[in-house]
């Protein structure tokens, strides 16, 4: 059958376009040593016996996906590829192909930590996500998340602000950023880290894709940190996947009156480790990485005039910051909020702000 | 020696006036069946061999304490008294006498739950303390705390607001209320519950007394709930005492960025059960007590015009409450805050408030 895939990458790409519920069976056959084309032929013949044209159509779409990737600067990383992340290869249902925008090498960093949480995160959830991510990044860890609104994007931004590397796993093709307003963030992520997806380039986002996407977030990481997960949060799907994959699950506690943290607290009740700071995560991973104390990257946080006006460990009130920066309160407050979200500043009580000490 | 105590209560009172670090030895001897006067004579002779006048002076003070109690309507409950709380009698170092203002019978209610926390509690800590206490009270449980500023007094007030019974354990004589501004609260507590202390009537508060007082808070209770304990909070002393006494220790999680919850989170890390609601406490105690659905006490919460303007489960914004009550925002906000602290109202997001469903 000339129309069936003829090399491993085309074969894996074709396998990746088969129904998602076949993925466990596909992994089994690949692990048994069968060539991708053989697995593709066997499975499609077994499950679509009366429809050989369906298999051929998938094969054509595979070739098209690879063409589209090549044209768009997207790297297809097949299951057989040495660049395929070993942690992800070890899960029960690894995607046959990972499409990557950005630096493929960032996917084999170890350990990676996933930070996931509520899309409608509170200022508290955003601040914690940003701060944990920045602190992990400052110790050289790669942070994985889902590019979603809320906690996910705060984690990505916190990592970038600390000069770190972050990986975003999408529920669409890597060239179809959702939500659309995160396109600039996605570009920043791809510059130093990577945007990845199991969905072929051009695949539009689909609510049904996100739960299965979550197993890749946890699959890439050694630990998953959950922030502000409500009772039915998608983050709990990621946490469940992490447990099935034998990854550590950690959760950040919070307010018990708002209902925002019911899912995270349920995880704590079930034995998830409590996270107050990045140290708790490193301890759980058995990592001892001192904070770097020097080596600023140009263009990072230190260049910020508001940050420059603050001294780590010395809370400063709004008037004093206004005086030092020459900015009025109305402009300062959103700026301080942004810095808080990025984990660079925190509120110190009494309306004061304090800079968080980082290498840069 | 005619000046030595001649009856059990006088003997126990004399024992209670000996140095606090003797209390374990005193309990041992009493448990072995020795009469209080015998224990007093033996111990003072052993430890103050050259100073018989010290023992006699203590004996005189014991008689004075009993006189002062009788004059002030304070009930001395000796270790031998059937009214002495059995849970407290079981600890390693029970006070020989418990001085009680109010209803002695409230001390033998079982199970009692202690709620303790930061003196400088945040609005969150106050709201949680008040709400948990009110919810426990609504199920008929007696709530124990320390009458301190902050979380303690919120727990007492929450209990009273729900028509429940609460017990305050002082670090001074029961007729010397500290902090002084809690005198009216102490009166309310004594009306339905009890103010208790191991310190004789008239004893002024002393910082050194509070840590030892804490063992009585936990000793009266089957479970201790810690709210907003910082790293060096006195509540952690109560939690440690509870663990030594074999009581359940539970903790309420909260914000990880403020440092206010480090102690509570450390307890969770060490295996304390996480508390989001009164149900978690009841479950830990193995109690299944449905909320009463009827039976209002006159003069309680339902008579409040602000509460009357709210319907349980239906968040209402400030303007709507102002319209219904005829009160202006400036007067409404402190009123709502007070109701929140008492656990009768909670914030529902978007500046709205919702009444918490209670029997009254």
Image (spheres, coloured by chain):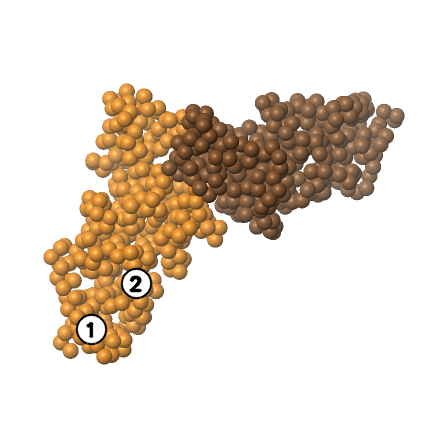
Chain colours: A orange, B brown
Q: Is residue A353 left or right of residue B260?
A: left
Q: Quadrant of residue B97?
A: top right
Q: Quadrant of residue B155?
A: top right
Residue B268 locus on image (x, y percent): 50, 45
Position above or below: A357 against A244: above
Position above or below: A30 against B36: below
Residue ID at (23%, 50%): A178
Residue ID at (24%, 68%): A18
Position above or below: B161 against B90: above
Q: Is residue B31 left or right of residue B216?
A: right
Q: Chain of mark 1?
A: A
Q: Chain of mark 2?
A: A
Image mark for residue A94: 2
Image mark for residue A55: 1
Quarter the N terminus of chain B occupies: top right
Residue B254 shows in this picture: no
Q: Is residue A39 left or right of residue B158?
A: left
Residue A70 locus on image (x, y percent): 13, 58
Q: Quadrant of residue B53?
A: top right
Secondary structure, mark 1, is helix
Quarter the C terminus of chain B occupies: top right
Residue ID at (17%, 73%): A56
Mark 2 and mark 1 in contact? Answer it, CB < 8 Å. no
Secondary structure, mark 2, is loop
Residue B193 locus on image (x, y percent): 67, 34
The front one of B6 and A186 is A186
């Amino acid at each position: 059958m000339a129309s069936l895939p003829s090399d491993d990458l085309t074969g894996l790409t074709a396998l990746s376009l088969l129904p998602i519920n076949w993925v466990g069976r596909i992994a089994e056959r690949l692990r048994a040593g069968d060539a991708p084309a053989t697995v593709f032929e066997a499975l499609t013949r077994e499950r679509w016996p009366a429809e050989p044209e369906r298999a051929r159509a998938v094969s054509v779409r595979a070739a098209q996906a690879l063409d589209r990737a090549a044209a768009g600067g997207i790297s297809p990383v097949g299951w057989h590829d040495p660049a395929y992340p070993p942690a992800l290869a070890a899960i029960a249902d690894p995607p046959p192909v990972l499409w990557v925008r950005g630096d493929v090498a960032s996917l084999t960093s170890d350990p990676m930590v996933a930070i996931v949480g509520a899309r409608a995160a509170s200022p508290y959830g955003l601040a914690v996500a940003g701060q944990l991510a920045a602190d992990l990044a400052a110790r050289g860890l790669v942070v994985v998340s889902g590019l979603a609104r809320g906690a996910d994007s705060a984690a990505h931004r916190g990592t970038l602000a600390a000069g770190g590397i972050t990986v975003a796993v999408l529920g669409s093709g890597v060239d179809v950023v959702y939500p659309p307003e995160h396109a600039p963030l996605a570009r920043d992520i791809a510059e130093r880290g990577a945007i990845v997806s199991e969905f072929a380039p051009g695949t539009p986002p689909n609510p049904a894709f996100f739960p299965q996407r979550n197993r890749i977030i946890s699959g890439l990481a050694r630990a998953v940190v959950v922030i502000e997960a409500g009772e039915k949060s998608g983050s709990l799907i990621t946490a469940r996947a992490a447990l099935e994959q034998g990854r550590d699950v950690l959760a950040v506690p919070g307010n018990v009156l708002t209902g925002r943290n019911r899912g995270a607290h349920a995880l704590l009740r079930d034995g998830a480790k409590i996270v107050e700071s990045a140290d708790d995560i490193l301890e759980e991973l058995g990592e001892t990485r001192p904070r770097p104390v020097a080596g600023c990257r140009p263009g990072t946080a230190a260049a910020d005039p508001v940050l420059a006006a603050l001294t780590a460990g010395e809370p400063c009130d709004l008037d004093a910051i206004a005086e030092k920066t020459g900015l009025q309160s109305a402009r300062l407050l959103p700026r301080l909020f942004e810095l808080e979200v990025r984990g660079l500043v925190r509120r110190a009580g009494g309306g004061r702000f304090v800079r968080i000490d980082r290498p840069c």
